[in-house]
Amino acid sequence: MEQPTVLIITDETEFARSITCRWQSERSLPAFILMSSDVRLGFDPETFELAIVGSIRPAALSVVLEALDAAGKRVLFVSSDLALLEKIRDRWPGMVALRRQESWLDTLILVGSEALHRVRAEANAMGAEKTSALLEQQATLGRYMLEMRHTLNNTLTAMLGNSELLLLEPGLLSAEARSQIETIRHMALRMHEVLRRFSSLEKELMVLNQEKRRKPEARPERVAAAF
């Protein structure tokens, strides 16, 4: 996620303008999508990471918040009505309800920035988990191929030996049969070369692991200084 996106749902132009202008002064600026409370037009949950809702028609409030809750996105709801804020907290405990009062923009930017930071951290963690799972699958496949290497080598040795014995008797085979056996021998040699590269790779990995073990660990005081 290179640049997060914030969806602002409001029926008041000044509400959206205030948020976007205030966020301009921050070092990290998200992209913005502006939308009215008429969510019947629909929105794509994949296009934003955080939603800010405020100053919308009362009749549309439940529809908007239900749609956002179903999308599973982080939501900041802003209102000057304390009773309404309490209702929002009770009905949608996963949403953050903020009171619109003095310095409310500072609070909103602070909470919103932290929410986007967590979204980014979760996305990075999920990406790392997927990468780790993929690497583990590849490692399992690699270990299996190394384990099967000896069996394949024995099979290839038998194929090469028998094909070479047959090719030593030129009068025993027809031209077509001889060509087919030469093809088998050639393919066996190619497979043998692939297995030889696996052996070379295994040795390289062993050397790398040995070098890694020999490297001295960082001293605690140096590690602490790095932070």
Image (tube, grey):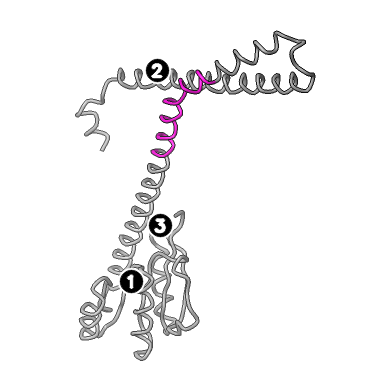
The residue to which callout 3 is attached is: 28
The residue to which callout 1 is attached is: 75
Magenta segment boundaries in residue numbering: 136-155
User: Foreground: 11 or 147?
Assistant: 147
State the quadrant of the C terminus.
Answer: top left
Q: Is residue 147 magenta?
A: yes
Vertical order, 29 against 71 (above or below): above
Residue in view at x 38 percent, y 43 percent: 133
Alpha carbon of mark 2 to alpha carbon of mark 1: how far? 52 Å
Alpha carbon of mark 1 to alpha carbon of mark 3: how far? 19 Å
Tell me the number on the disc at residue 207: 2
Say few, some or many: other residues with alpha carbon within 10 Å of mark 1 (under 14 / 14 to 19 / 20 or more): many
On screen, residue 21 versus residue 96, left or right, reads right
Which quarter of the picture shows residue 69? Answer: bottom left
Q: Secondary structure at mark 3?
A: loop
Point out the frontmost of discs 1 and 3. 1
Residues marked 3 and 2 touching at CB (< 8 Å): no
Q: Position of residue 145 (x, y in %)?
A: 46, 29
State the quadrant of the N terminus.
Answer: bottom left
Q: Secondary structure at mark 2?
A: helix
Q: Position of residue 131 (x, y in %)?
A: 41, 44
